[in-house]
Image: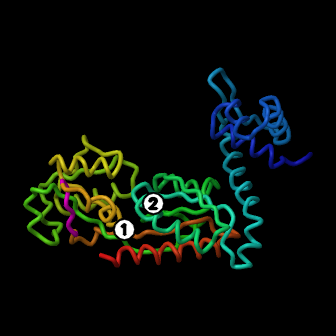
């Protein structure tokens, strides 16, 4: 029996991502009948039903979920074939799909991208934000080639490259008494209300641990959806919050309503890492990318 083709696998992934034949066909620039035929042939060749169709669209069957996960990895491997030549020539180029934490990427990558483009004009870097857990899943599924994350919990199939340590800062309203201290000890947070991002963020997990150790109160009813939202709530006097140093450097220093202080706690630091799938033919490229990101971050943090 003939093996599935790359076009058939791409068709399955497009439908899995969009949930609609029409949208998937537009994404692949093919007609709906042609897309439907690709799925029919794929199901025939695998001998399994991969999609459930109804008026609302299409969704993967349990078997379809397994096949789609494998298909993502296969397509990712194929897309990396030309990178083997680039890596051997020590020329960082081509397309790299990077995932990044929303609490990190926007405050670091704008300083990195111009350097990358100047040194490697052939590089195309696409960056998309996701939570730490989603980044690690995306690496394994092939959604991302590489991801910029913090405190990864990746397993044995993921390569982790530590880049730098980033301090966590305490954000305070401008009239807060704690501003009298140049560095705030964790014990000073006892009984204080701490604002956090919504659950799912690695930063939230760290903040909760700091609160637990210091005896502070986590305001579960006032979770922020972004660091900017947290900063605004701090400025209104709703509580204190903990921010990454790069965010403090980028945003808080220009905010008259909020002032940040270093936080003296063993937990008040996060390790920033670059992760990718073990065995990737672009490993040399990713190491070059990680080294450059680390150097640029160290330069920024050293300015303080």
Placement of 289 over or under 203, stated as above or below: below
Q: Position of residue 283 (x, y in %)?
A: 64, 72
Asked whether the viewer can see residue 152, the reply is no
Q: Quarter holding the C terminus? A: bottom left
Q: Residue furthest top?
A: 55
Label 2 sits on residue: 105
Placement of 206 over or under 4, stated as above or below: below
Secondary structure beneath disc 2?
Answer: helix
The boundaries of the magenta stretch are 257-262
Q: Position of residue 293 (x, y in %)?
A: 50, 72
Q: Residue furthest right?
A: 1
Q: Nearer the viewer, residue 114 or 215?
A: 114
User: Mark 2, mark 1: which one is toward the viewer?
Assistant: 2
CA–CA distance between discs 2 and 1? 14 Å
**How many C-alpha atoms fall within 10 Å of the one at disc 2: few (<14), some, or many (≥20)?**
many
**How many C-alpha atoms fall within 10 Å of the one at disc 1: few (<14), some, or many (≥20)?**
some
């Amino acid at each position: 029996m003939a093996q599935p083709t790359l076009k058939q696998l791409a068709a399955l992934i497009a439908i899995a991502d969009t949930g609609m034949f029409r949208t998937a066909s537009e994404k692949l620039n093919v007609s709906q009948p042609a897309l439907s035929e690709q799925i029919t042939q794929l199901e025939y060749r695998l001998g399994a039903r991969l999609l459930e169709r109804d008026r609302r669209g299409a969704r993967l069957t349990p078997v379809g979920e397994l096949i789609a996960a494998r298909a993502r990895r296969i397509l990712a491997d194929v897309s990396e074939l030309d990178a083997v030549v680039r890596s051997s020539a020590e020329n960082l180029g081509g397309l790299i799909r990077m995932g990044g934490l929303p609490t990190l990427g926007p405050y670091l990558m704008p300083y990195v991208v111009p350097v990358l483009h100047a040194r490697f004009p052939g590089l195309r870097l696409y960056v998309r934000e996701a939570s730490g857990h989603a980044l690690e899943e995306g690496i394994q599924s092939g959604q991302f080639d590489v991801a910029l994350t913090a405190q990864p919990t990746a397993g044995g199939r993921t390569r982790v490259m530590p880049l730098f340590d980033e301090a966590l800062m305490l954000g305070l309203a401008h009239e807060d008494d704690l501003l009298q201290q140049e560095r705030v000890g964790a014990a000073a947070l006892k009984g204080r209300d701490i604002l956090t991002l919504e659950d799912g963020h690695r930063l939230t997990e760290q903040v909760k641990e700091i609160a637990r150790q210091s005896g502070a109160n986590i305001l579960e009813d006032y979770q922020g959806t972004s660091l900017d939202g947290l900063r605004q709530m701090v400025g209104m006097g709703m509580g204190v919050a903990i921010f990454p140093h790069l965010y403090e450097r980028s945003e808080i220093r220009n905010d008259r309503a909020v002032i940040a202080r270093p936080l003296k706690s063993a937990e008040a630091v996060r390790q920033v890492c670059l992760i990718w799938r073990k065995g990737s033919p672009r490993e040399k490229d990713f190491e070059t990318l990680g080294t450059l990101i680390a150097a640029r971050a160290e330069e920024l943090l050293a300015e303080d």
